[in-house]
Structure formats: C-alpha cells, structure tokens
Image (cartoon, helix red, strand yellow):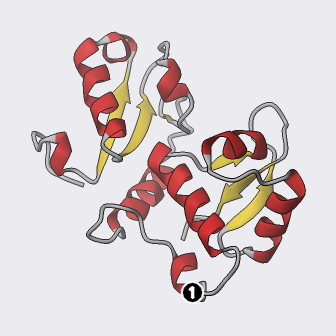
Amino acid sequence: MARPGTPVADCSAVLVALGANSAESSYVTYEWAYALGNGKTVIPMKLTECVMHPRLQAIQHLDFSVPGALPWESLVARMRGVEIGDDSGEPAHAVDAALPADEPDGPHVRAILAYLNQRGYQMANFERLRTRLEGDLSDDRFREIVARNATAFRPARPKGGKPGLAKLVP
C-alpha cells in the first residue's frame, strides 16, 4: 500500500471508499478504472448506501455501511494478500511454491489465481472463468482442479448459484 497522495501507478492496491457522492464522481471512477487497467488490486469499500458502478459490482466489496458488522478483518486480510506480493506487483500465493514445475494443473491454477486477484474476486463461477481464461475447461475439469488443489481453492456457488470455486486466502 502507499501513503495518501501517492500516484496510483506507484501503488500495489487502491482502496475505493464509496458513498453517495464518491460513487458518482467521475474523478473517483477515473482513479479506480486506471488502477484496474494497470493490473492493480482494487478493493471497493461501501461506506454508505450508494449505487455502485457495474464494474465495481463485479469485484467483491467490503460493506462498511451496516452498523455493527464492520468487516475490518476482511479488509486487513485483503491488504495483507496484496502486501505479500513480489516485485512484479502480482500477489504471491503459497500454492505457487507448493506446485512442482511439472504439475499439470500449475498453469491453470496460476491463471485462475491471477484472474481472481487482478479483479479483486474471492470466487467465480466456472462459466465466468471459462470465458475469461484461455482454454475450454469443462465443469468436471474445474472440479478436478479444485479437488487436487485444496490449498488454493474450495468448491463454491457464487451469486446466482452456479457451480464455481473460491480461492483460499494464503
């Protein structure tokens, strides 16, 4: 993370505080869109009720608008995940070190994690992953990858109830 006032290009992640005014601000939208376009992790934080931009709706946000249910631990965990990244700006994962170079699932695991991390997702359904990643993996193949890589993923049913996976925070 960086100090306030640091250019987005020099940050490893951008926290987006969303309220009625900031959610509609073209300047705020420019900043987080620039960050996403440059592969930065974007962490939306909903502070008050507001209409979120559709692009931010696709990223798992932290909801600070509910009194008594403040997700501080989730915010700290997400920030730690960014901070342990290597010099390339990509978050490091324990699974990378655990995968032998000749592991057949290795490229798929790394591609799935890179996709989820770049967009700030904790989970995605298989259909979304299939359209975003190269290759044409079947649901059964995704299930095999999840089962063989239990330190990286668990089965999940994201929004809409479709079969998918969730990453395990290292």
Q: Secondary structure at mark 1?
A: loop
Query: Residue 91: which quarter of the image?
Result: bottom left
Task: Identify the residue shown where x is 31% and y is 17%.
Answer: 22
Q: Using residue 137 as the reference point, say whether residue 93 is left or right of it.
A: left
On the image, the x and y values in percent for residue 76 come to 42, 56
**130 or 85: nearer the viewer:** 130
Task: Identify the residue shown where x is 43% and y is 63%.
Answer: 81
**13 or 147: nearer the viewer:** 147
Query: Residue 80: which quarter of the image?
Result: bottom left
Q: Quadrant of the C terminus?
A: bottom right
Q: Quadrant of the N terminus?
A: bottom left
91 w.r.t. 95: above or below: above
On the image, the x and y values in percent for residue 41 come to 38, 47
Q: Using residue 72 as the reference point, say whether residue 137 is left or right of it.
A: right
Check the image and name the residue furthest to the front.
135
137 w.r.t. 67: above or below: below
Task: Identify the residue shown where x is 74% and y is 54%.
Answer: 165
Q: Using residue 160 as the reference point, say whether residue 83 is left or right of it.
A: left
Query: Residue 31: which quarter of the image?
Result: top left
User: What amino acid type should be assigned to the residue bearing mark 1?
Assistant: Ala
On the image, the x and y values in percent for residue 43 come to 41, 41
To which residue does mark 1 refer?
101
Check the image and name the residue furthest to the right.
140
Question: Tag count in the figure?
Answer: 1
Binning the other alpha carbons within 10 Å of mark 1 as few (below 14), some (14 to 19) or many (20 upward) gives few
Task: Identify the residue shown where x is 11% and y is 44%.
Answer: 6
Check the image and name the residue furthest to the left.
5
